[in-house]
Amino acid sequence: MSNSSLSRRGFIASTLAGGSLLGTSLPGVFSSPQTARGQEKPRHKVERMGIGAIGLRYQGSVIANKAQLHGDIVAVCDVDRNVRDQAKAAFGSTPHSSEDYQDLLARKDVDVVTIGSPDHWHTRMVIDACRAGKDVYCEKPLTLTVDEGKLLTRVVKETGRVVQVGSWQRSDDRFRQAVEMVRGGRIGRLQKVEVVLGKNATSGSFVPRTPPAHLNWNLWQGQTPDVPYIEERSHYTFRWWYEYSGGQMTDWGAHHIDIAQWAIDSNPVEIHGTARMPNVVNGYNVAIDFNVTYKYANGVMMTVSDTGDNGILFTGDAGRMFVNRGKITGAPVEALKTNPLNREDWKVYDYDNLERPPRAGKLDAIINHMGNFFDCVETRRTPVSDVESQHRSVSTCHLGNISMRLGRPLKWDPERELFRDDAEANAMLGREQRKGFEVI
């Protein structure tokens, strides 16, 4: 897979404008694949794969649209009938529609699967898809718990399937350049990384009510505890409930902590998280005012907090550099004008061709990320956001949440993937799973 093939996949100009990108409205979310002028055209019919799209609200609709550049949506699945019906009507050739994703996985015309479900379903769906012989593009964060990641990495290795995780900042030129510069020594020896993710949402108590007829609430809950339906538990706001996600630590953290750890090139060994935990019944319950300090095996220190300029600040003994989705700044960046990156700096991914893609916006990077996935499906190479790296990145997020919830420092053994001499913390590496929905 060459980097030139990535750079040719540019922005789909007419896809997902404005509020639809943020999931504020469903009409217009689904559209036929189009490419910007001068960019690579979709594959011919004979080359195109059958795509099954699971979870089609918000980011799930985004990745399904991007996948259409490389294949045809032949099956859609969502536990919300309204979402499912809109997807079925929008995608060409009237794809098969189902409520249960197992029906989709059983179809022989499905070659690859996109997964845009809530976080607590990701691992089970990826495992089942791999065992069904499908290659998978799954939204981040990859897992709900560390133990899920241990199992998932084994299954992907055993089945030999290609799995790309939607941590698309790895396909954004700014973030990749930052990692290349750090690992190429452009800021000297890396000493400290400061990551800012933003605040978690807070709430009062919500009122339980009868689930709407179009939503299979039992199936939506999956492995999590069976509780009365509250509208704010589902769809976009599920991320503010610890039962289903991990707040900003796993939402933004699966992006920024992933990039930071890619640059650090090591694993944490000590974690100290502080936060206020909400004390509200039937309300958002992820951490408030959080801050986590990590010490890595190679001596680098990383802080992750909810306050400041969203992004990542790298500090070395020869300079500092800041990067987020809008900019990459710092004296080492300015120095590139006279001392540009060269082949020796390209250490973060094994590109065959070192042609640099143009600056990427969010949708550009997602398209490159999806293009990388389909290239790897064809070549059976490892994608840029592979399961092992993403398991390690989101595990770092989970470790921070565990330390915050326990309110004390923890010591981590990255080889054994266990806390050192801490039964209480180790018990939190997994969670009790509802009978019939276990991650197996």
Image (cartoon, rainbow, N blue to C red):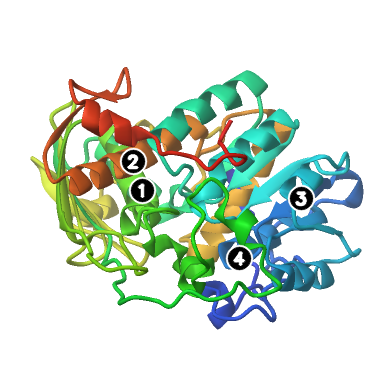
Task: Tell me where residue 10 appears, x and y as whole percent.
Answer: 61, 61
- Answer yes or no: do the residues labelled 1 and 2 have beta carbons within 8 Å? yes
Q: Which element type, helix, strand or loop, lies under badge 3? A: strand
Q: CA distance from mark 3 to mark 2?
A: 35 Å
Q: Which mark is residue 177?
A: 1
Comes first in the chain, label 2 or label 4: 4
Comes first in the chain, label 4 or label 1: 4
Q: Which part of the image, by quadrant, shows the N terminus? A: top right
Q: Work out whether residue 241 or residue 44 is closer to the camera in this orientation and state it.
A: 241
Q: CA distance from mark 2 to mark 4?
A: 24 Å
Q: Which element type, helix, strand or loop, lies under badge 2? A: helix
- The mark tally for this picture is 4
Task: Tell me where residue 72 appears, x and y as whole percent.
Answer: 82, 54
Whether residue 212 is situated above or below residue 7 in the rendered picture: below
Q: CA distance from mark 4 to mark 3?
A: 23 Å
Residue at the disc numbered 2:
180
Q: Which element type, helix, strand or loop, lies under badge 1? A: helix
Residue at the disc numbered 3:
52
Residue at the disc numbered 4:
11
Task: Tell me the amino acid under the disc marked 4.
Answer: Phe
Q: Which element type, helix, strand or loop, lies under badge 4? A: loop
Task: Tell me the amino acid under the disc marked 2.
Answer: Glu
